[in-house]
Image (cartoon, rainbow, N blue to C red):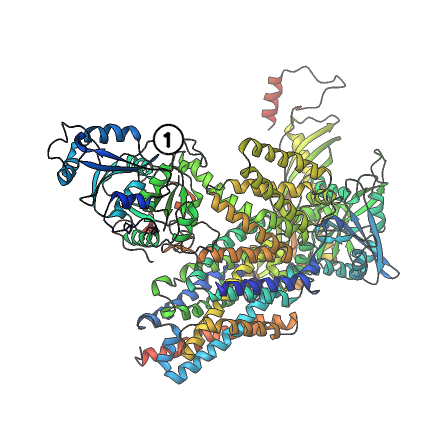
Amino acid sequence: MFRESKNVPPETGEDAPITAAAMEAVFADCYDYESRELHIGGREANRVRLCFIDGLVSGSDVAEQIIKPLTDPGRFGGEAVGSRAISMMLGGSVYVYTAKSRKALGEAVTDLLNGFCALIFDAERTAVTFEVKSQQRRSVDAPKEEKVVKGAKDAFVETMKVNTTLVRRKLRNPHLKIKEFSLGERAKTAVTLVYIDGFTNAGIVAEAARRVSRIEAEGVLTSSVIEENIVDNYRSPFPQVISTERADKFCMNLLEGRVGILADGLPLGFLVPGTFSQFMKVPEDHSAHYLVSSALTLLRYASVALTLLAPAFYVAVAMYHQEMIPTRLMQSMIDARASVPFPTAMEVIMMLLAFELLQEAGIRLPSPIGETVSIIGALIVGQSAVEASVVSPVVVVVIALAGIAGYTMPNQDMGSALRLCRFFLVLAAIALGMFGVATGCGLLIYHLASLESYGVPYMTPFAGAEGRHLGRALLRRPMTVKRDREPELKTGSGGEARL
Amino acid sequence: MIRILPTSAVIYGGRAAWLSPVPALLGGLVLRGVYRWLRRTAPEGAGLADLTVLSLGKAAGRAMCVLYALWLTFYGGFVARSASERLLATVYPNGGVGVFIAVMLVVALITASGLTKTLSRTAEVLMPLLLAVIAAVLLSALPDVASENLLPVTYLDAGSILYGALPIFNVLSAFAYFLFLMGHVEPPKLTRGNSFPWMVLLVLVAFGATFFTLGTLGDKLAISMENAFFMVIRNIRVFGVVERVESVVVGVWIVTDFIFLGAVIMIVSELWRTVTGAKRRAAFVPPTAALCAAAAFFISPDAFDFQRWSDFIIPAINMTFTLVLIPLPLIAGKLRRKY
Amino acid sequence: MKRAVLALTALGLALGLVSCSGMTILSNYRRLENIELVRTITADAAPEGVTVSICGAAGKESGPRQYECSGPSMGVALGELMLMPLGRDAILSHAESLLVGEELAKTGMDQCLDYMERFSETRLDTGVLIVRGGRALDLAAGLTGKETPAPDVIAGLGKNISRMGEGYFFTCREIASSLAQNGCALVQCVKGEEGEKLFEERGELDIRPAGFAVLGTEGGPAYLTEEETLGTLVLLNKFRSKNMDLEVEGTVLTVSVDRAEAGFEPVFEDGALAGIDIALKLEANVICLTGDGALTDALYRKSAEEALSRRILAAVNAALRRSRQLGADFLDLEGVVRRRAPLKMERSGESWAEVFPRLALNVRAESTLLRTFDIVDPPDVAGEEENRSPWEKLIESLNGS
């Protein structure tokens, strides 16, 4: 597992015996690796080596809880050497709540990397590791990307333990299982599978565990490493994994029977299976009045149609189907187009690209500059383009409408996928008019219908559920009405999902 | 369907043809019952093609399957041509029929290459959309509907209503073809094949089309028109926002043609798979699509000739297959306890 | 994946072919800014065949436009006009009205209607008008002002004509449907009159309704008089309102007839259709009273109601007479009878052509004056009104009724 060094003879394999020299060899050229010699009970003869990674452990905890009792002659005097000392440490003579005895070098190294410190007994080929993690971590804060209006404001952070604690605090249930995996050939990132045992479909849990354990990557440093490795169809631009930074959303989905995935270092939780209707929901749906929530959900679906179809529809109508435009509007459009030098197709594509450029510039730049760019782009450049007759005002309105509708998507991955499809539909409309739009839409729906997530049809309940439970996706029932479980997730003892 | 339905139903059923979807649905349900009875004792995983082979024996059964495949290939071509003619007559008068046939068959090729369940799920999403669009559009046409074009209806019209149900029943009877996709094609759970909701949906569309065409144009004018339904759609204004929405309706309708065409190609490929004993049907999809394209191009030289095909010849052959040629061998096999 | 790439490549190729080849969808492409929006089409007889003109809408920077062209038929002339010399594409999909000159209406009405129904761009709800006593082209030109296009003036008449009780804009669909069902159809006629040019932006002419024409009769359209047109409107239940002066007991009472409904009841004798009882229900409101009338007087009101009934009855009878005289069932009486008594009609077995000339058509009318609005009786300008209290007037009116 570890690279052999030409200068250090000790064995440094995964199962190699633990010695101070071997540990030094493993962490050779590691600036943050620290080790020092300690005298147990203050006696020079009883030597032991303390190793830790600086920054990962709390220095004061090491000094107060380990070094102080260990060097106290009153506590570790007389016969307290070797295995006797180890036994005393594991028995509680050192004030650390987690202490582990390690015989294999690999285990000790992993502990060190996880914020433990190790006391190495060369003669016994043993290390005792103590959890003394540093508390230097980002504190739990309100979510940055998923705004909360009325709801819990604790978002996931980069530390796994904090995230699991957030989940555990919301779901105080012994059946909430958190299964750990170590991923990444080199990074050894801790990834956990979170589910409610006996409730979440066992088939989905097993499949998720299989896919997570089979992830082959150097390290899990970005969300795509998890997402693209655990979805059914990674070629599809449509998201099939629900990712959220909100702990409440994560827990709500666990309660619906989904399997959660948390990765150390990522302030996100992932949930499977992901279905189209799930990406149209926000946790606020459960906070607002049910009629308001239902109306907003319907509005989001209308937004999908608008963001996808508005530019394509405009192109088709303006190029081929002018008969559809009412007389007065038609006359204004003709007047507006009269001084624009570019054909409609070019005009729309140019505006779509400009919109994407502005958006990308707004995201990439630091927020004050980004906002300025957006304002300059949207207001000044847009206005000037219209006044200079580079584009017609109708096109600006159509593209802006489509763009704004796209922003209502609760999931930005879904928004991006729809933006991508918007381009294809515009091209189809340019080539074939309304026939092209229909063809494009048909293929798009066919693609969505072909997707499955962990055996659950992606378009459920619109397809694959025989028309049942359609209301669940579009409307929210009052909380006083007993909620049915999501049938497609086959929770409880309802049987296995097809995989 | 929409090309022939309102006009054909009105030709046969006259003023009362808007009631014809009701007996057509009843007829469809009876036919569905017959096919259910025929499949009740079928061995686990056996499709209609397997049952035909079981009933008639290997040689005769396979010959029958070849006949079905040839007819359905031709039928697929007819569907593609029909959709193309509709596009030409309504929205793209200056276009060429070949363009539409080519695009339609490429899309059908893509859909037919996938799984049956994907196609059925696509239909599940699209059919309600189609219904919603048509309902919204037709409701906007409600002010143009004159009751004097629809009423009175008396018992004397019973015969006409039944007669008018024939073209609608003809469309409904095509569900029999989809039974070729049942059985071992995919696990039975994935293809439940509940045709009842589809029949109701089709009948609702047929009712809407016939009701509004008759109510707006009257029976005599509707009969004289080639695309009576689209003539009605042509005059619709939706809340003063859009006018003449025929391109939208034609567009939405064409998507259903894609699905139907994809399904037909899939069925034909499945039949060839049964005949040849091949393991997978994928290899038969491209040649079937090519043959459909050829049939679509050469079915008739002009729109007048094509009208004859769509009004009389195709419905007659279709009914012969769905009512006689497909069930008859199965009935014989069932009575002779072949399965 | 390979299959998907192949399929998408094939689709791309198909789309590419579609976009690039000549006989494709692209030939339907029109640049929006090149479009000439046609709202009114005129057609007139000409030595070459037909002269057509198209009237566009007024643009932001251009005034109203009208272009004309002649050809052997309407289709050819319009076809040439649509490839306009100015390089603009005329689009007929927004045509609201078709004006046909009287001369062309005599012989060429069928080609106008056929063109409008068959051509995929035109709508079936385009209003069709026959221009009496002149050319449609001239009327459209006369209506066009500096800023007001002719289609606006025609559309204005279309909106108000029903409310004026002087006609109804029949659309291509209604005309075609009526021709198919009854063998005849009604068309609104209009005429141009020199009007006072009160506004600079208005044209030289004003458009006025000129009764109905009946298509499907021998020797070209038959034109109905004003009275026959009124009767036809009432019998077709297309009457919306009309102001009319009634002479009642030496006074002139102006009423607004707001409701005129015709109810039909076929009468069968020995299994054969013998006649139709037509019951008219009229409702009116008082607009103005000139003279010495007393609306509080029930007898006066009754006289006024009878006067109204007489007026409408005369119009209805005139329309019925004309229908019989022309042998054209433009009032759709056959349809009415078949709807009211379908079984009896079916059993009688007689054709309408045989029955219609000998039918007894009994028309009766029942009129009601609904309200007088704020002023009950006219103001006593002459000062002859006796000094009575409102209570006394009320008691008198109650005694009277």
The answer to whether C282 is drawn above or below residue B249 in the figure is above
Residue identifier under label 1: A139
Quadrant of residue C172 in the image?
bottom right
Relative image position of residue C244 (x, y in whole percent):
73, 36
Q: Which residue lies furthest to the right in this view?
A: C47
Q: Residue at x 24, y 27 (%)?
A: A64
Q: Which of C71 and A8 is in front in this view?
A: A8
Q: Which residue lies furthest to the bottom in this view?
A: B59
Is residue C349 at least partly visible in the picture? Answer: no
Relative image position of residue B7 (x, y in whole percent):
58, 64
Q: Which residue is drawn at 67% across and 51% down?
A: A345
Is residue A48 at least partly visible in the picture? Answer: yes
Q: Which chain carries label 1?
A: A
**Secondary-structure class at tag 1:** loop
Type of residue at label 1?
Ser
Relative image position of residue B2 (x, y in whole percent):
56, 62
Relative image position of residue C16 (x, y in whole percent):
64, 62
Quadrant of residue B273 in the image?
bottom left
Q: Nearer the viewer, residue C359 or C188?
A: C188
